[in-house]
Image (cartoon, helix red, strand yellow):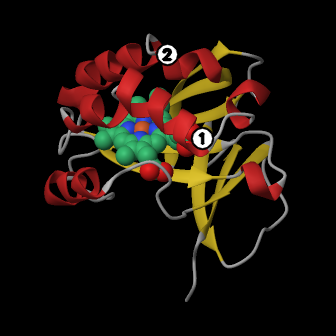
Amino acid sequence: MDASFIHFTGGQTGAWQVTGMTPVIGPALDAVAAIDLHTATELLPSNGTWTLRGFSSNVRYAEKTEVEQLRAIQSGLGRPEAICAALIPIRKSAAWWALAQDERRQIFEAQSHHTATGLQYLPAIARKLYHCRDIGEPFDFLTWFEYAPMHESAFDALVAALRQSPEWQYVDWEVDIRLTLQA
Ligand code: HEM
């Protein structure tokens, strides 16, 4: 089955219990108690308080050596010990999208060291990036991370470092949603 779309549905029930929802920049999302993830072959309508939709895609910025480094050490989603998660929807500004691809790569890695910084947190943090700018969604990206409780402070340090970087000057909407897997 081609399950390239992902639906994050926020509502009263779901596999992941919401432990915090922080609007980092821009408006908050309506508060929900839980989030469910569904893969799908098509874009389905929302059936919760809200649904954020995205799709996995090819890499844009990672170069060959970085892709190889990531593949060598990254862990997959769904590890039994990784009962904590973060869903961080992100939108970037018109100024970012007006840049050429090479200018964006320059800011993303040469100036902000996004991949180099992130690699230091692997394999403890498992990650998945979904795109949604091209399907009319409110955000440009849905970022999803899973980790064990003992790595929560490391994850907090990682997001703090990225938010200090030049890349984040182009982030104009970001909501930080933290979750734990329902027992
Ligand atoms: C866990 C360690 C992390 C690693 C190894 C990592 C690595 C990467 C890589 C390689 C890409 C580029 C994908 C491509 O070439 O298209 C990327 C994109 C992205 N990452 Fe991370 N990342 C990490 C953590 C984070 C965190 C914590 C956030 C959010 C707070 C985040 C937000 C994003 C966003 C929004 C993009 C898309 C950027 C764009 O296309 O403009 N990443 N990440």
Give the quarter of the image for residue 120. top left
Query: What residue is rendered at 19% in x and 40% in y?
Result: 124
Q: Earlier in the sequence, mark 1 or mark 2?
A: 1
For residue 5, the mark is none
Q: Secondary structure at mark 2?
A: helix
Residue 173 is situated, as x and y percent measured from the top left of the image, at: 70, 23
Query: What residue is rendered at 45% in x and 48% in y?
Result: 61
- Residue placed most toward the observer, 106 or 52: 106
Instruction: Assess whether mark 2 and mark 1 are in contact (beta carbons under 8 angstroms).
Output: no
Query: What residue is rendered at 31% in x and 26% in y?
Result: 155
Q: Crowding near pointer 2: few (<14 within 10 Å), some, many (20+)?
A: some
Give the quarter of the image for residue 138. top right
- Residue placed most toward the observer, 173 or 96: 96
Is residue 84 visible in this depiction of the protein? no
Vertical placement of residue 134 versus 10, above or below: below
Amino acid type, callout 2: Pro
Is residue 106 visible in this depiction of the protein? yes
To which residue does mark 2 refer? 166
To which residue does mark 1 refer? 34
Amino acid type, callout 1: Ala
Residue 100 is situated, as x and y percent measured from the top left of the image, at: 64, 40
Residue 156 is situated, as x and y percent measured from the top left of the image, at: 34, 18
Q: Secondary structure at mark 1?
A: strand
Relative side of 100 to 134, left or right:
left
